Image (cartoon, rainbow, N blue to C red):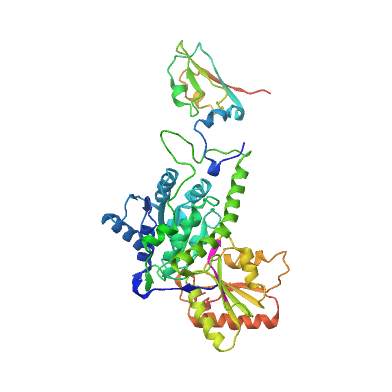
Amino acid sequence: MSISLGGVCEPGTTRVNKTGGWRTFRPVFDYDKCIKCKLCELLCPDMAVFPRDDGFFEFDYDYCKGCGICANECPTEAIDMVLEEK
Amino acid sequence: MTVIRTLDKDKMSVAEGSYAVAHAVKICRPNVISAYPITPQTHIVEDLSQFMADGEISNCEYITVESEFSALSALVGSAAAGARCYSATTSQGLELMHEVLFNMSGMRLPVVMTIANRAVSAPINIWNDHQDSISQRDTGWIQMYAEDLQESSDMTAQAYKVAEDKDVMMPAMTCMDGFILSHVYEPLVLLEQDLVDEYLPPYEPEYTLDPKNPLTFGAFADPTAYTEFRYLQQQAMDNALPKIEEAANEFYEIFGRYYGGLIDEYETEDADIILMAMGSLVGTIRDVVDKLRAKGIKVGLLKVRTFRPFPAEAIRNAIKGARVVVALDKNISLGLNEGALFTETKASLYNTKIDVPIVGRMIGHGGRDIPVKTIEDIVEEAKGIISSGINTESKYADLKEDLL
């Protein structure tokens, strides 16, 4: 593949730029504590939290950089930041 | 070929430098103009906004903005949408654009911008030197310096021609000395629409922003590709060297005026001493050369018209026969105590067999006048360097010791 003049490309290239590999800590839900308040989804800067049909949420680990904002802001401390292991 | 002016008296008028440039911009048929007024560039954008108000520029948007950062940012978007764009600035305004200058060249958008060269703060100084544009030399913009009003005007069309060339596609700065050129009235020929239309074809961008066919400009490049973008930009600069020569020659064929392409040589063929400079200072040196040649002193002038891309080969060929070369700079690299033209000319001789002593003299900073006498003194000093051998010293030529 050769690069175009000025790096002009089709939109949507961020999808293939999987930033999950940058992560040191991974967020993990404790669904017993989750009150479905949606704050984690709203505050995620990478849109890496998405809703499930049952009202709970899940992480998209392909794009979650492990910044921990969700865990920090969760009012019921339902999100743990767990060290990634090789 | 040296400077040629075939000036038809019937076509001549007397105009201010800023008006001549604004008129040239109008004749180049821009689609978007965005600029923030700053002394001494103000008259250019005033004249352009008057043209807009009078309906003299068709198919053009004039965007008024709150800062130079916004002025150039607006043009990044406009140029990406396929518009031929123009802006003008100087000094602090140009420094405020610094970040966007890189974006513009990285996205390969061939915008043309006039710089009415002025000193930078602090202390605040509105008069002319070249510190503002020289400080932006690594941003990937083509930089050309005009000697007088006619050249400032004609350079605008030439800059579009080079910048928009498919093998170049890089933005260009046309630099004119603030006040010395921007606020001076001289007899000149204002660019004619029919001739410019023949010279400068409409801008046809490779890619354009279009809602029906969405594209991403200026996207993310990680370490696996970023280097290659810089490499391609350098390649574009290399391509610009012959294109600038071609643009000057083609301009001569259509308009009958020629100022040199990358450089211009005056009385250099048998010169022992060659003075090199950029901008309006070249005009003063031209007169000094005439005066000293009449006295039998073998002195010549090398006008550096294009500073980026740096015409190293052309400069080497021009100075190789001299016994001493003096580079006169209206800028300083602080901490190096050298002007840019001196440093880069010196560097261009490294690893070549050309062994010409070259000295740097910084001069005319913050608008200090450069009288003929000062240049004559520099020539006198250069004569001493010939007899004493190699001397690569760089210093201020017009320092007032009593103020220190």
Is B392 or A33 nearer to us in this picture? B392
Residue B72, above or below A51: below
Residue in front for this viewpoint, B33 or A72: B33
Query: From the viewer's perspective, is residue B128 above or below residue B233?
Result: below
Q: Quadrant of residue B82?
A: top left
Instruction: Name the quadrant of the N terminus of chain A.
Output: top right
The kind of secondary structure the magenta stretch mainly shows is: strand
Highlighted magenta segment, given as a residue range: B301-307
Front in this rendered view, residue B383 or B125: B383
Q: Residue furthest left?
A: B54
Q: Name the image quarter holding residue B395.
A: bottom right
**Residue B198 percent location from the top left of the image:** 42, 58
Above or below — where is A75 with respect to B156?
above
Q: In this figure, what is the number of numbered marks? A: 0
Image height of B269 relative to B223, above or below: below
Asked if residue B41 shows in the view, the reply is: no
Residue nearest the viewer, comparing B95 with A68: B95
**In the picture provided, is B317 more to the left or to the right than B193?**
right
Q: Quadrant of the C terminus of chain A?
A: top right
Residue A66: horizontal and vertical position, in percent? 56, 27
Residue that appears at 51% across and 12% down: A31
Q: Residue B117 occupies which quadrant of the picture?
A: bottom left
- In the rendered structure, does residue B304 fall within the stretch colored magenta? yes
Image x and y of residue B369, in percent: 45, 76
The residue depicted at 60 percent of the width and 63 percent of the height is: B311
B261 displayed left or right of B317: left
Give residue B62's position: percent from left, percent from top. 33, 51
Task: Using the rendered image of the protein, determine whether residue B80 is visible from the camera's viewpoint.
Answer: yes
